Amino acid sequence: MKRAPILFLLIVILTFCSFAQTGVLKGFVYDASNGEPVRFCMVQLESSSFGAISDQNGSFFIDKIPNGNYVVRVTMLGYITLNDSISINTNTQQKRYLIQPESHTLEAIQIDAEGQRRVQETRTSVITITPKDISKMPSIGGAPDFAQYLQILPGIVSTGDQGGQIYIRGGTPIQNMLLLDGMLIYNPFHSIGLFSVFDTEILSTADVYTGGFGAEFGGRISSVMDLKTKDGNKKRISGKMDANLFGARMLLEGPFVKLTDITGTTLSYLLSVKGSYLKQTSDIFYPYVKQGLPYNYWDLYTKISLTTKTGTKLSFFGFNFDDQVKYSQVANYNWKNWGLGSYFLIIPGEVPMSMEGTLSYSDYKSAMNDAGFAPRTTSLGGVLFKWTFNYFVGKSVFSAGIDVNLFTTKYSYPNINNVVVNLDPGYTTDIAVFVKYKYNFKDLLLIEPSFRLQYYASLSSASPEPRLALKYNVTKKIRLKLAGGLYSQNFVALTSDRDVVNLFYGFMSSPRDYDLPDNFFGKNVKNNLQKAQHIVFGLELDVLKFTNINIEGFFKNFSQLTSVNRYKQYTTDTDFIWEKGIAYGGDITIKFEHKNFYIWTVYSLGWVKRTDSQVTYYPHFDRRHNINILASYQWGKKRKSWQADIRWNFGTGFPFTQTQAFLPNLGNGNITDDWMKKNEEIYTLLADINKGRLPAYHRLDISLKKKFFLGERSTIEVNASVTNIYDYSNIFYVDRLTANIIYQLPILYSIGVAWSF
């Protein structure tokens, strides 16, 4: 027994020594041609099990490495493999690797890098989009766009070519959060649904969470789109200019302080300008479009980035997005969004941690003028501060952070008697803290529990929101996954029942108590928040060569929603009513990629229902079946200078409320009014809500591109595309008073040229 304490002490000493005799390798991987971070790159210690995948910032971290000499192997599809000899000791080794692009890469590297990421990340109900992915879309209007690619993702429903509205697994646009480098963007899509406000060339990656997202995101109850922009070329001045029949754009980027193997700090800039002149060109090139194509927009984005040798970064950025639609004698619609922001990333030297955050201001205004009605206007804007702390332990990560959002909303609309109602709830403050832990057990089981505590100051309400994501790797080619949690938000979108297709959304914070009923389905309402609960389950299969199959099912319970009181008759009635709803369904995605071929196929099946105190109905974005097929093929003897792309979309019809009758209405008046001389107004009597269905929507698009290489860094690309090639008439908008119909885009051709340098 006397030997027991000695034996215990010996074990403790040996354990301590074993940890003391290990080291840490951390650093960044950059593209040597432009200094951009290389994401999801494999960093492996040769002839060992130690390795990591670089993250969104290009950083990697490997700990508990036994002391000794190693060869670090850095591999990524499209880059020359880099080998570096290092010596590991008890100190932290910090490296910065610049890897050279290569035109030909072994297929095995592609499978290994992508396969490792699928094994080491839960990736439930989330898809990462890169500019390379978007480039495989038919170049409608000469430029493949984030908005076009978003519409082919599982669970996403678009209202079509026009209108620019995106609905994600049962959620409305106001229930979708879009972040650009951590800054809120309130309307990321132009009214012509082919284009987003972002130039594809400025994007680095975009993570689209269609449900079940973690506690690092909050304030929305349906989905999150997290976009990251690149920093600007750190090596040389470069850019791209192109023009086509739809519009033109220009990108210019370069260094103030160049990146070299020796340089410690770099300073770069990026400027993007793009716009549409379709309203002017449509009269010349598309005279067969009866209503014309009255879509004009201008987008400006600029960014300055400072990066140190250790990876610490500070960026400043600003944007101005403008959109205008003018349908004569039917409706005029316009909106404008502008903002300023800054982003910081801090990488301490010896500690396995990072800190990042955003401070930004964003402002949005929109207006809709319908023929015969007073205009509808809305505005919202405010300040957002986000801060996140990450601590790395092997392949596991602990994260914590805080969000503060201070904003104001205003909304003005005509009621059923065409009397303007103004809603101005004033300033609102939302504060949240969150924690998240990602535990990786031998690349077999991944567990990501997280918790968010959201406090809504204007409502004096706190919302505790636990969330969880799991992945079980049955084998390296078969994986099961699950995600879910509780969600809340303080934003409300206000639409009009008179719209057959909704163009305009009024935005405001949650109504006050006097604007809502005290109870809902016989229960007292505790707070005025929008609330939802998600559960998403899935299966990933890599059993077929060069093919990835992803199958997911989902259920979203929207347990508390706010809607405009469509039943209001008296001034004593509340302006809003409570609703609840459910959304459920499933998707199957098949991706095939080998050599010159790329095929993407998605089938989505879904149901969306809403229930108020009187009726259960299908909202106007409920689409039962949705199919997207995308194919891309590249060819050419040397550099694959030719590319052909094709995309077909089919979607069953949306619900809408039919018009039952038109009645004369004298409106409100006084007892002294002369009713015999008073002018009548037209009163629209609507049928039961959304009992009708629009016809099915379908469209086929194709494009062809040819590149001419003028030098090592100078390329001219000529492209041609056709939208809606078989000229199918899809309904876009119906004016209830006149019954005028505006259709979605007819057959449209486009040719364009782009110069990259």
Image: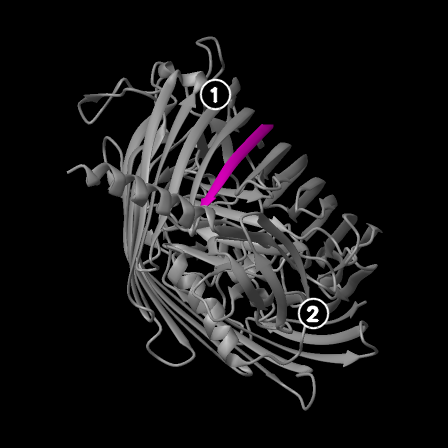
Q: Which mark is residue 355?
A: none
Q: Quadrant of residue 653?
A: bottom left
The magenta segment is 382-392
Where is the C terminus found, in terms of image quarters? bottom right
CA distance separating discs 2 and 1: 84 Å
Picture layout, residue 13 above or below residue 666: below
Picture layout, residue 216 above or below residue 405: below
Q: Total of numbered circles in the picture?
A: 2
Question: Which structural element holds mark 1?
Answer: loop
Whether label 2 touches label 1, CB < 8 Å: no
Q: Which residue is mark 1?
A: 676
Q: Residues within 10 Å of mark 2 (few under 14, many from 20)?
A: some
Q: Amino acid at mark 1?
A: Met
**What residue lies at 39% left-to-right and 81% top-to-bottom?**
545
First of labels 2, 1 by sequence position? 2
**What residue lies at 66% left-to-right and 42% top-to-bottom?**
312
- Based on the picture, tell me whether residue 136 belongs to the magenta stretch: no
Please identify the residue farthest to the top as the structure is shown: 672
Residue 591 screen position, x and y as percent: 43, 72
**What residue lies at 24% left-to-right and 36% top-to-bottom?**
5
Please identify the residue farthest to the bottom as the structure is shown: 637
Front residue of 502 and 146: 146
Picture layout, residue 254 above or below residue 385: below
Q: Nearer the viewer, mark 2 or mark 1?
A: 2
Residue 423 screen position, x and y as percent: 51, 21
Q: Which mark is residue 100?
A: 2
Q: Amino acid at mark 2?
A: Gln
Front residue of 193 and 52: 52
Residue 553 screen position, x and y as percent: 28, 57
